[in-house]
Image (cartoon, rainbow, N blue to C red):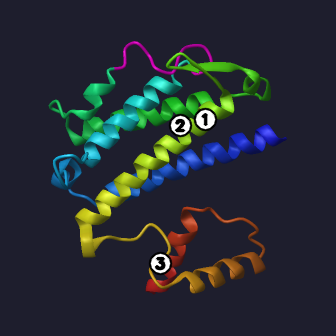
Amino acid sequence: MFIDNYKADAIQSFRNYKRMAERAMEQVSDDEFFQTIDAESNSIAIIVKHIAGNLHSRWRDFLTTDGEKPDRNRDTEFEMIGDAREALMQFWESGWQTLFNNIGPLTPEDFSTTIMIRGEPHTVVEAINRQLTHYSYHVGQIVFLAKHLRSSDWKTLSVPRNKSAEFNRFLEEKQAAGQVKTDRLEAPLEFSKKVKK
């Protein structure tokens, strides 16, 4: 029971972070997608390329081979080598599909397996948590960059400023109406749309 709940929550969290990044990226132009804010920062495009490279490496043959695949060249994930936005987004999509194709079928028995990442042993829970925190870190960067680049044109992905008390009442109303649990990503967006009406 615990493992089933953990796996379901992990999958939902991965899906939420993917959607959050995509909703941020939908707001930026092609030029902004490739733009850096200073010499040391990464563009959204670079972060997408890095996450996608990591997804392909970590999740392919998840239970049977080291998560750092020999065909991965991590250093080139931080370079733009004739990369186009459409191709990067296809790489991103296929990377996430690799994750969901490998995490979805995991059985409770699989969670007793030890897997390797860069030669270090990990439990399946440790490996999932490692990637969940890694991707959330980079998704936060994508959201930050998109928000910075869009400035006053940014459409919030979370609870609007100075609306926390109203949002809490909104959630209370949903609970009173019988909706015990809300989607952590969708509820703030639903609330934002309601506030704008």
Q: Is residue 68 magenta?
A: yes
Identify the residue at image location x=39%, y=58%. 23
Q: Which of the pair 68/34 is nearer the observer?
A: 68
Measure the alpha-carbon separation of dots 3 and 2.
Answer: 32 Å
Three-letter code for the amino acid on which mark 2 is drawn: Gln
Nearest the camera: 90 or 158? 158
Residue 186's spot in the image, x, y percent? 55, 64
Residue name at image x 27 percent, y 40 percent: 46
- The front one of 57 and 186 is 57
Distance from Cα at disc 3 to Cα at disc 1 = 33 Å
Q: How many marks?
A: 3
Residue identified by numbered label 1 = 128
Write the residue at 73% across / 23% down. 110
> Crowding near pointer 1: few (<14 within 10 Å), some, many (20+)?
some
Q: In the rendered image, is residue 105 in sight?
A: no
First in sequence: mark 3 vs mark 2: 2
Q: Which residue is mark 2?
A: 131
The amino acid type, in three-letter code, at marker 1 is: Ile
Secondary structure, magenta segment, majority class: loop
